[in-house]
């Protein structure tokens, strides 16, 4: 059974995702579509607008056959680690192809980029060191590095999906049997676009903003009917709901305690403590704390690590002991797992029990944190079995 993997967040699942799945299946000639999907918290350090189970089920309704959860230790990370975990799971599942969305509309061979990166890593590192502390942000610095070393390929490190695409390509080429890559340009909207224009496609950013403002009429045409219904029926989640919890944590913990949190470096704990009682909201807090080195996204992830008391040891444990946590599947996805089961080297987890709860501790805590701000009580991990359609 030829398979194609997609790394996704589906926050929420919209028409652009449905288009990508259809196009990826067509280009890769895959019989089975596998999604590695972030759980209740996402790569940029944000909570998902609706929980992982709802999002996984929506994916099954629109062309995905098997949904695997990307563990928190990989999901809430910079692009490099996010890519490393995603590719690791897809490689273990034996997927022959990988498709991803890209904001880049020009001609680019991601596989060639990956080869260049692999063969010239020392030169890239040296060039990066030479232009550091020049007032540019990290994405601007990396864009300049590649402009100098690889002028024939236009690379823009300010484009989130483009960065992830490059990350997937770099990780993929390190494996003995790299997956065939199928990048698919976005339709009609850019990643950070906040307006919804006429048409059937809009960015996740604009959809989430319109949901927050309850502008239902404007987003109906850009969502599958099931997504539209789920968003209207369920409480939607954003960072502001967690602000009182974060404020409490930062208030009661000393700077010494905060230094033990994963990724708490360069004295940033002092800025967190300094501004926590001056801010009126989470947005206001991040605006006060952020610097060129500590971007909005990096701070969001760090705040999640504080809320969950994440340590380096816990993260490293998941990196060294990965697993395949199944969220949802249909008959085709189940058949694919049965065909592959004797070749899998990672454990397949379908329910949380005493044997695996220690390994899943970060995912479980993330689910419990997510539930703390929800009016609707729904267990995210214990006693919850994969969705089957």
Image (spheres, rainbow, N blue to C red):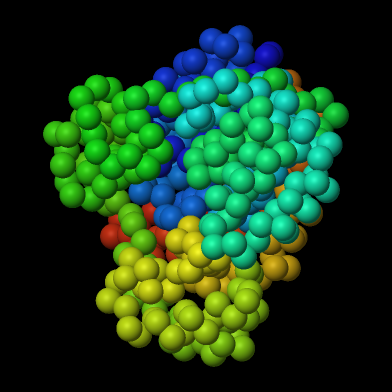
Between residues 216 and 338, which one lies in front from this camera angle? 216
Q: Quadrant of the N terminus?
A: top right
- Percent coordinates x, y for residue 12 in the rendering: 37, 39
Residue at image x 57%, y 11%?
A: 27
Residue at x-position 33% and y-position 66%: 283
Instruction: List x then y, in percent, for residue 63.
Output: 47, 20
Is residue 79 left or right of 43 when viewed as pictured? right
The residue nearer to you, when weighing 11 against 199, is 199
Name the image quarter holding residue 179.
top right
Q: Is residue 158 above or below residue 314?
A: above
Q: Is residue 46 visible?
A: yes
Left or right of 19 on screen, residue 198:
left
Q: Name above or below for residue 198 compared with residue 233.
A: above
Left or right, 147 with respect to 156, comes to: right
Coordinates of residue 238 in the picture (x, y in percent):
34, 57
- The percent position of residue 203, horizontal first and vertical second, equals 35, 36
Identify the residue shown where x is 20% and y is 25%: 198
**Would you say 114 lies left or right of 307 here?**
right
- In the displayed structure, 380 sits above or below 229; it is below
The quadrant holding residue 251 is: bottom left
Rendered residue at 17%/46% (across/down): 214
Residue 298 visible in the shown view:
no
How many numbered circles are shown? 0
Q: Nearer the viewer, residue 25 or 287?
A: 287
Q: Is residue 162 above or below residue 238?
A: above
């Amino acid at each position: 059974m030829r398979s194609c993997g997609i790394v996704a967040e589906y926050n929420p699942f919209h028409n652009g995702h449905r288009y990508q799945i259809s196009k990826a299946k067509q280009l890769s000639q895959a019989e089975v579509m596998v999604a590695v999907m972030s759980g209740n918290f996402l790569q940029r350090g944000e909570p998902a607008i609706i929980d992982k189970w709802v999002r996984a089920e929506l994916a099954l309704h629109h062309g995905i056959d098997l949904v695997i959860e990307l563990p928190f230790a990989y999901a809430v990370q910079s692009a490099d680690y996010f890519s490393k975990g995603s590719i690791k799971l897809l490689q273990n599942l034996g997927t022959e192809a990988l498709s991803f969305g890209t904001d880049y509309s020009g001609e680019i061979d991601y596989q060639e980029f990956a080869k260049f990166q692999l063969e010239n890593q020392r030169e890239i590192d040296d060039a990066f060191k030479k232009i550091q502390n020049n007032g540019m942000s990290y994405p601007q610095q990396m864009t300049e590095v590649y402009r100098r070393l690889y002028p024939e390929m236009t690379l823009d490190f300010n484009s989130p999906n483009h960065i992830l695409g490059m990350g997937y390509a770099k990780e993929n080429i390190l494996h003995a049997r790299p997956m065939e890559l199928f990048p698919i340009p976005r339709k009609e909207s850019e990643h950070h676009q906040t307006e919804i224009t006429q048409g059937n496609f809009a960015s996740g950013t604009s959809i989430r903003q319109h949901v927050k403002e309850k502008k239902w009429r404007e987003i109906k045409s850009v969502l599958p009917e099931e997504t539209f219904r789920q968003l209207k029926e369920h409480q939607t989640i954003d960072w502001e709901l967690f602000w009182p919890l974060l404020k409490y944590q930062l208030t009661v913990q000393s700077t010494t305690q905060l230094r033990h949190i994963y990724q708490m470096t360069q004295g940033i704990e002092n800025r967190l403590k300094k501004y926590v009682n001056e801010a009126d909201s989470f947005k206001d807090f991040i605006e006060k704390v952020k610097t060129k080195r500590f971007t909005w996204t990096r701070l969001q992830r760090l705040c999640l690590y504080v809320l969950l008391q994440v340590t380096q040891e816990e993260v490293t444990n998941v990196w060294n002991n990965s697993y395949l946590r199944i969220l949802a599947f249909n008959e085709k996805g189940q058949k694919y797992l049965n065909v592959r089961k004797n070749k899998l080297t990672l454990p397949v987890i379908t329910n949380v029990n005493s044997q695996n709860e220690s390994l899943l501790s970060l995912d479980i805590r993330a689910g419990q944190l997510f539930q703390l701000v929800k009016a609707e009580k729904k267990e995210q991990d214990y006693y919850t079995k994969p969705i089957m359609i």
